[in-house]
Image (spheres, rainbow, N blue to C red):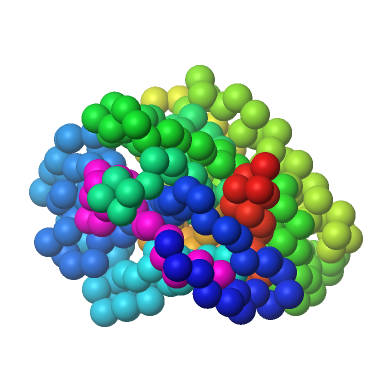
């Protein structure tokens, strides 16, 4: 693979690629016609009902999904940012629930002559049902390619760039006012699969809170489906409790996520905002990283360290 000089903002030096780098992302629908296959994939083969599809379509309509190229191409943007930071010509991108599938990416890697893959998921925190799902699917696909070895970077939240991104963006919102509470949120998981997930989320929140000198903050969980026993309390419950206790300003810090998408632009910016503003309080949210160079440098450093290990 050819190399290029890294434009790395002083954060990452170019790496000598000896294995294919595979960037893994959840994916997002680009057209309304994508919703059925997209949700069917997420639900492990169970298609949404007509009623469920109407609700889903309305949520994506509300955030302008179908006309927003930025939302539709976020994975590609993050890939380009990572290539620039690492100083390489090509990183392979694959989605869990949309085309450019993981099967397609693995075939391209094999056709290019690689015998080793280093994978990393855009999500910075490891969970069995989240990041673990990518690993299990990769391992299943690679059963057809016994000569290909696989190394997975399971998490990278402890990189200083990750902490610095969220700390600096949160600090810009003047979060230390007496009537303000900051709510750090991440995707909920089934209680039977928690493992170290809660510890890592809490540890990251503590690091950011200490950096910003927060007075009032807590953690919450979002995006749980309406079935089974999932990790709580929900972000809605935490917001309601904070308002009852006198909070006049709520700052959402959805640091378990990495980019603008329906769980942020609808669940946070519409549903959570509605709860907050119904009481006359103020709703604010820390901007999502998307392809931000500082944030992506945390991922790049994790890759560089593993390659040079």
Residue at image coords 17%, 35%? 46
Coordinates of residue 40 in the picture (x, y in percent): 19, 42
User: Is 114 in front, or is 266?
Assistant: 114
Q: Is residue 219 left or right of residue 140?
A: right
Is 199 magenta? The answer is: no
Q: Is residue 211 left or right of residue 162?
A: right
Residue occupying the far top of the picture = 192
Is 102 magenta? The answer is: yes
Quadrant for the C terminus, please: top right
Coordinates of residue 86 in the picture (x, y in percent): 58, 65
Coordinates of residue 256 in the picture (x, y in percent): 58, 50
Q: Quadrant of residue 284?
A: bottom right
The correct choice, above or below, for 159 with respect to 135 in the image is below
Q: Is residue 127 left or right of residue 308?
A: left
Magenta-colored span: 87-108
Coordinates of residue 299 in the picture (x, y in percent): 60, 56
The correct choice, above or below, for 68 with respect to 275 in the image is below
Residue at image coords 84%, 63%? 212
């Amino acid at each position: 693979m050819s190399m290029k000089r890294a434009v790395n903002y002083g954060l990452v030096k170019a790496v000598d690629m000896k294995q294919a780098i595979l960037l893994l992302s959840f994916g997002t629908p680009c057209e309304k016609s994508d919703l059925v296959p997209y949700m069917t994939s997420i639900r492990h083969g169970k298609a949404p009902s007509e009623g469920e599809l109407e609700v889903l379509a309305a949520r994506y309509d509300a955030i302008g999904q179908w006309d927003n190229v930025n939302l539709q191409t976020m994975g590609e943007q993050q890939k380009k940012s990572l290539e620039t930071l690492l100083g390489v010509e090509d990183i392979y991108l694959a989605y869990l629930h949309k085309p450019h599938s993981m099967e397609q990416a693995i075939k391209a890697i094999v056709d290019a002559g690689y015998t080793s893959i280093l994978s990393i998921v855009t999500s910075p925190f490891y969970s069995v049902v989240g990041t673990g799902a990518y690993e299990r699917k990769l391992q299943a696909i690679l059963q057809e390619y016994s000569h290909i070895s696989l190394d997975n970077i399971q998490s990278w939240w402890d990189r200083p760039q990750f902490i610095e991104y969220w700390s600096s963006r949160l600090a810009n919102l003047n979060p230390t006012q007496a009537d303000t509470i900051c709510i750090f949120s991440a995707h909920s998981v089934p209680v039977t699969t928690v493992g170290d997930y809660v510890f890592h989320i809490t540890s990251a929140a503590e690091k950011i809170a200490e950096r910003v000198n927060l007075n009032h903050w807590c953690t919450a969980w979002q995006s749980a489906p309406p079935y089974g026993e999932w990790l709580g309390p929900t972000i809605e419950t935490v917001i309601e409790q904070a308002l009852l206790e006198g909070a006049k300003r709520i700052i959402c810090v959805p640091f378990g996520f990495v980019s603008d998408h329906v769980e942020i632009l609808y669940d946070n910016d519409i549903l959570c905002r509605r709860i907050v503003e119904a009481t006359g309080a103020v709703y604010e949210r820390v901007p999502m990283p998307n392809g931000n160079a500082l944030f992506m440098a945390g991922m790049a450093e994790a890759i560089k360290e593993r390659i040079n290990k």
